[in-house]
Every structure is written in C-alpha cells, then in structure tokens.
Image (cartoon, rainbow, N blue to C red):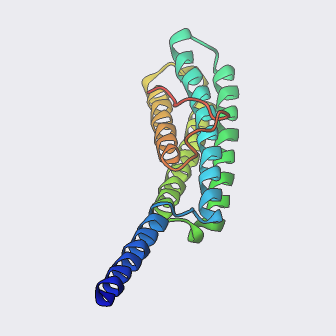
Amino acid sequence: MKLFTRSYAFRMVAVIAAALLLSSAAFAVKPASSVEISILMGQARQDAVLADKDMTALESYSMAGVPWQVHFLRLQEIQVHVNDLMKDVNQLRAIESNGTPSQQDAINRLDSLVSSMAANVRVTIKYLNQNHSRVNMPPFNDQVHIDRLLINSIYNVTRAHAPKNNMYFADAPKK
C-alpha cells in the first residue's frame, strides 16, 4: 500500500508541476519594454489617423477647385504629422531590441513606411511649389493618392501592435 501511495503522490506532484508550467506560460506578462512599445505604437497610430484626416481633406480639394495655397497649408499640416511619426519611430528604435520578434518586425516595417512617406510628402510639396496651377491635374492627384496609401499602411502596422482598448485613439482611416 505504501508503494501505491508514493507512486500516486509522485504523479500528483508531476501533474501539478506541469499545470503550473503551462499556466505560467499561458499567462506570461509582457516585459515592460514590450508594453512601452505597444504604447508608442498607439501614439504612432494616432499620428497616422491625424495625417489620414488631413490627407482626406487634401484629396477632396481637387474635386472642389480649392486654390493651391490651401493645398499647401494642408500639406504643411501633413508634414507635421509625418515629423511626429518620425519621432515615434526614433523612440521605438531606441527600445526595439527589448521588444518581441513581431514588434521588432513591425518597427522595421514602420521605419521603412514612414521614411517613404516623408520622402513622398517632400516630393508632393516640391511638385506643388513648382506647379501652382496644376493642383487639379492627375500627376498631383496621383501623388496625393500614393501618400494616402502609405498613411493607411502605416496605420495598419501600428494598429496590430497598439493597445486595443484605449479610448484616446481615433478610428481607422477610411480607404
């Protein structure tokens, strides 16, 4: 009878140990830096939403015959949002090595997209400065549309890695 009791006790200890290991893995807490990355991704998402709203307005100007000066002012606002996104990326880069592999991948994608966005906005501003009378023409409208697609891509990268239930973040940009 002692053999059965020892064997039973050993099995119970093994089962409890296995359950504890599985439950601790299932409920693992994210490291502080991973949480910080999520928060910064949320800030980048918010900046992308603001840029998208301005980009939507800019796209609508071509249908309304708005003067080039209004286009220029809106592009300056978009440039501010892109600069904010660059700051977000720089902060993310500083703590990237402490993030999860998927967060590190997202930071790399975000860096590439924001760099492309910054370059494209500069091209759009340069085109507008050289072609004041052509803001309603396809080349300018196509450039604005490309900028908008980049903003949507930035939003999608940040959305996947930002806090899910933060009431301070706006809704997704419209496509």
Q: Is residue 146 above or below residue 17?
A: above
Q: Residue drawn 64% across and 40% down?
A: 47
Q: Is residue 97 above or below residue 114?
A: below
Depth check, front residue: 33 or 53: 33
- As drawn, is 142 to the left or to the right of 124? left
Q: Residue drawn 56% across and 47% down?
A: 162
Q: Residue drawn 59% across and 34% down?
A: 49
Q: Is residue 42 visible in this depiction of the protein? A: yes
Q: Position of residue 175 (x, y in %)?
A: 43, 27
Depth check, front residue: 18 or 56: 18
Q: Position of residue 76 (x, y in %)?
A: 69, 34
Q: Is residue 93 visible in this depiction of the protein? A: no
Q: Is residue 80 above or below residue 31?
A: above
Q: Residue drawn 50% across and 12% down?
A: 63
Q: Position of residue 46 (x, y in %)?
A: 63, 38
Depth check, front residue: 140 or 133: 140
Count of numbered circles on the image = 0
Q: Quadrant of the N terminus?
A: bottom left
- As drawn, is 51 to the left or to the right of 151? right
Depth check, front residue: 57 or 105: 105
Q: Position of residue 131 (x, y in %)?
A: 57, 28
Residue at the front extreme, as displayed? 1
Which quarter of the picture shows residue 96?
bottom right
Residue at the top extreme, as displayed? 64
Residue at the bottom extreme, as displayed? 3
